[in-house]
Image (cartoon, helix red, strand yellow):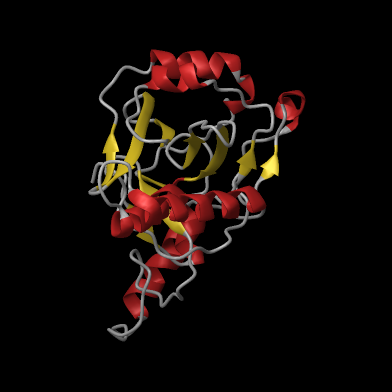
């Protein structure tokens, strides 16, 4: 929870007062999906834990959903980026995941009470229908990955190839939606084509630059927290919506 903020009745009443006293918003301005407060291009998000859809919100509404372990329909998307320098995944291990393209993201659904895997394609993202036993083995071999926050963070994994080892990053869930939206506009054929590969490379370079490295020895010292939001461009609707 953000220090000094009570997400209870006082916060909710403050939002309700803004909704009932504000004049109708300018239709040319982007507004908060919850209270209609005008927001800029850079803004935080909350995610519906059942629908997996993102909502663009103002800071006040974002703060309402930052409480840890609260039973809420929405959760605030944090802004934590981590890299895992010790991550190990061989080509055989990747093949065991049965993902048809070279990129996948995993997140833990509190509703389904299991890990869900998605990968990009021409229609946006597709959910893996295959068993996740192989992913359980990857987690066992890489215990530092077990810092994921349900519903709002994802582990983004890139397959190994002849030029690089496999890579894994922890990212906010809306970053995955943003990547999926970008790829949908450039994807060609089965493997995405040159433009998709360039977009993926650019995305991973950006994520790598923003990420704090977390080694296996430091895992216990790394808290699961919700830092102050650094606003990102509005992503597309979430997978499975």
Viewer-side residue, 229 vs 69: 229
Residue, far front = 162
- Relative to 47, say whether 126 is above or below: above
Give the residue at x 69% y 32%: 85
* Horizontal arrangement in the rendering, residue 186 relative to residue 206 (left or right): left
Viewer-side residue, 99 vs 237: 99
* Horizontal arrangement in the rendering, residue 141 relative to residue 175 (left or right): right
Q: Position of residue 84 (x, y in %)?
A: 65, 33
- Quarter of the image holding residue 151? top left
- Relative to 147, say whether 198 is above or below: below
Give the residue at x 38% y 49%: 47
Give the residue at x 35% y 82%: 29
Viewer-side residue, 196 vs 206: 196
Q: Position of residue 179 (x, y in %)?
A: 41, 52
- Relative to 70, say whether 46 is above or below: below
Number of disc labels: 0
Q: Position of residue 35 (x, y in %)?
A: 36, 68
Q: Position of residue 232 (x, y in %)?
A: 50, 63
Viewer-side residue, 22 vs 101: 101
Give the residue at x 57% y 37%: 163
């Amino acid at each position: 929870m953000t220090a000094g903020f009570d997400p209870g009745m006082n916060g909710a009443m403050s939002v309700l007062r803004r909704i009932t006293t504000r004049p109708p918003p300018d239709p040319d301005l982007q507004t908060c999906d919850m209270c209609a407060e005008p927001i800029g291009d850079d803004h935080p998000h909350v995610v519906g834990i059942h629908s997996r859809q993102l909502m663009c919100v103002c800071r006040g509404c974002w703060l309402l959903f930052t409480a840890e372990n609260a039973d809420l329909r929405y959760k605030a998307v944090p802004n934590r980026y981590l890299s895992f320098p010790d991550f190990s995944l061989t080509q055989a291990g990747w093949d065991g995941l049965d993902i048809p393209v070279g990129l996948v993201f995993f997140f833990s659904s509190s509703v389904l009470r299991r890990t869900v895997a998605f990968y990009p394609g021409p229609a946006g993202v597709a959910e893996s229908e295959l068993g996740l036993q192989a992913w359980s083995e990857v987690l066992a071999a890489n215990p530092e990955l077990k810092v994921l926050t349900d519903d709002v963070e994802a582990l983004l994994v890139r397959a190994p190839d002849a030029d690089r080892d496999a890579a894994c990053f922890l990212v906010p869930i809306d970053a995955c939606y943003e990547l999926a939206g970008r790829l949908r506009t450039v994807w060609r054929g089965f493997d995405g084509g040159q433009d998709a590969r360039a977009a993926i490379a650019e995305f991973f370079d950006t994520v790598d630059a923003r990420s704090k490295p977390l080694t296996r020895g430091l895992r216990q010292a790394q808290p699961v927290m919700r830092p102050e939001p650094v606003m990102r461009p509005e992503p597309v609707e979430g997978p499975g919506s």
